[in-house]
Image: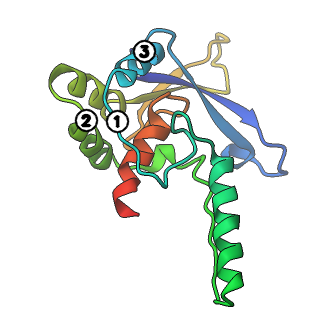
Amino acid sequence: QWNASFGCPIPKWNGKEGWLALHLIHVLDDIGKPFHATLWARLPRHYDDHSFGFVPGRRWEEAIVILHIVLWMINQFVFSWISAVYDMANAFPSVRNAVLNNVIDRIAAGMPATILKQRHCDALLVLESSECDREGHTHLACYSTGVGDLQGDVPAPQKRILAFDPCF
């Protein structure tokens, strides 16, 4: 149960139909979310100097200010440059489980590592059917997410940062 989320479709109002017209919000259970957040908070983590956003004590606005200062300095030397900025806000569910497992293995061992890995490796999404049967009941379907963290899970953004920091 601690690895399950209940999917709540919310209309996007984008003129499309079916699932393209819906944004799926995950409602996490009341015990699993704080339990995993507490377990994660007890682990030692180190973030590179260039990491901002979701890093304790740092804000993404700082990164924007630093970028503008660096670009201003480059302009003073009349160098050509190009800047690409990516919004990683929706990237948490897309990180492969093997990558997340590697992050956890670097900072945890034993039972905490096993429990944290189960959170994403065994994650389930529960959806309620939109139509009722003849008796007026809706039905639930349970799906394995297959990859990534549960949306709304507290450690998800920090795991993503720790996963991609070595690439930079």
On the picture, is 104 further left or further right than 139? left
Q: Which residue shows up at 37% across the image and 25% down it?
A: 40
Q: Quadrant of the N terminus?
A: top left
| Mark 2 or mark 1, earlier in chain | 1
| Mark 2 or mark 3, earlier in chain | 3
Tag 2 near tag 1, CB within 8 Å: yes
Please, is residue 75 above or below residue 83 in the view? Answer: below
> Three-letter amino acid code at disc 1?
Arg
Residue 106 in picture, x, y percent from top left: 23, 41
Disc 3 is placed on an element classified as: helix
Q: Quadrant of residue 9?
A: top right
> Three-letter amino acid code at disc 2?
Ile
Q: Is residue 148 visible?
A: no
On the picture, is 165 further left or further right than 6? left
User: So how many labels did they put on this image?
Assistant: 3
Task: Estimate the spatial distance between the alpha carbons at disc 2 and disc 1, rounded to whole Å.
Answer: 7 Å
Please, is residue 94 above or below residue 114 in the view? Answer: below
Q: Which residue shows up at 41% across the image and 50% down it?
A: 48
Residue mark closest to the camera, 2 vs 3 = 2
Residue mark closest to the camera, 1 vs 3 = 1
Q: Which residue shows up at 35% across the image and 41% down it?
A: 46
| Mark 1 or mark 3, earlier in chain | 3
Res 107 label: 2
Coloring scheme of the render?
A: rainbow
| Residue at mark 1 | 45
